Amino acid sequence: MYYSNIKDVVSPIFANHTFQNRNVGEFNIKGVQSGINYRGINKKWLASVNYAYTDPEATEIDSAGNNTGRIVNVSDISVHKINAIVNYAFLKKCNVNIRANYLSKKMTGRNTSVPTNNNDVYEPFVIFNSAVTVQNLATGLHVQLVCNNLLNTPYYTPGVRAAGGIRFPGYVLQMKRSFYIKATFEL
């Protein structure tokens, strides 16, 4: 179980004829998480799955930065999350890792932290990520090749709410498939 109270959350407001970000909000986030792990007999295979239920609430802030006293749902946080990982070690120094991350739908509009005129639903999605790691390629040198969003799945997160009549994007496209190489050296 977990609980987090975050004060001074940045919120967009309209003041003195300009758009500003100010520390005016407050989040109360509570939830429960559970998981299960499996390690193969030969210790080369490892698998794990975890599930989290989150109840994210915020104090409503109007476009002038005033706390209305109403409690609303946080649009940026999915209520249900599932993560699954499969890991395989081979050749003593090599490791392949594949991860799947599921996030349930997110809502904006009335009674949320992003009060748009329309009640947008951000559909649930699954993102796959992978990594291949070689440890001690040379003494102390570890190299990792990572691919995030392996299947190039398009997905969005809620954008910034409108403030003082200024409109902002209601949703933000997230990163497409990306690769990177990471090298670390231990002294």
Image (spheres, grey):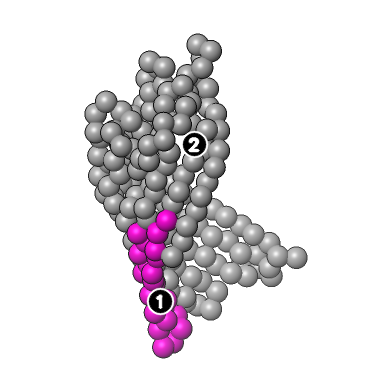
Q: Residue furthest front?
A: 69
Give residue 25's mark: 2
Q: How many marks?
A: 2
Residue 86, picture quadrant: bottom left
Q: Which mark is residue 37?
A: 1
94 in magenta:
no
- Residue 76 lies, in percent from the top left, at 39, 42
Q: In this orientation, does residue 65 appear?
A: yes
* Residue at x-position 41% and y-position 35%: 69
Q: Are marks 1 and 2 in contact (CB under 8 Å)?
A: no
Q: Where is the N terminus found, in terms of image quarters?
A: bottom left
- State the quadrant of the C terminus: bottom right
- Which of the two residues, 107 or 147, is positioned nearer the viewer here? 107
Which residue is rendered at x = 46% and y = 61% of the image?
2
Q: Earlier in the sequence, mark 1 or mark 2?
A: 2
Q: Position of residue 29 (x, y in %)?
A: 44, 51
Q: Amino acid at mark 1?
A: Asn
- Residue furthest toward the right? 187
Mark 2: give few (<14), some (14-19) or many (20+) Cα within 10 Å. Answer: many
Q: On the picture, is 151 further left or further right than 134? A: left
Q: Secondary structure at mark 2?
A: strand
Seen in the image, is 186 located left or right of residue 155? Answer: right
The range drawn in magenta is 30-53
- 100 or 79, nearer to the observer: 79
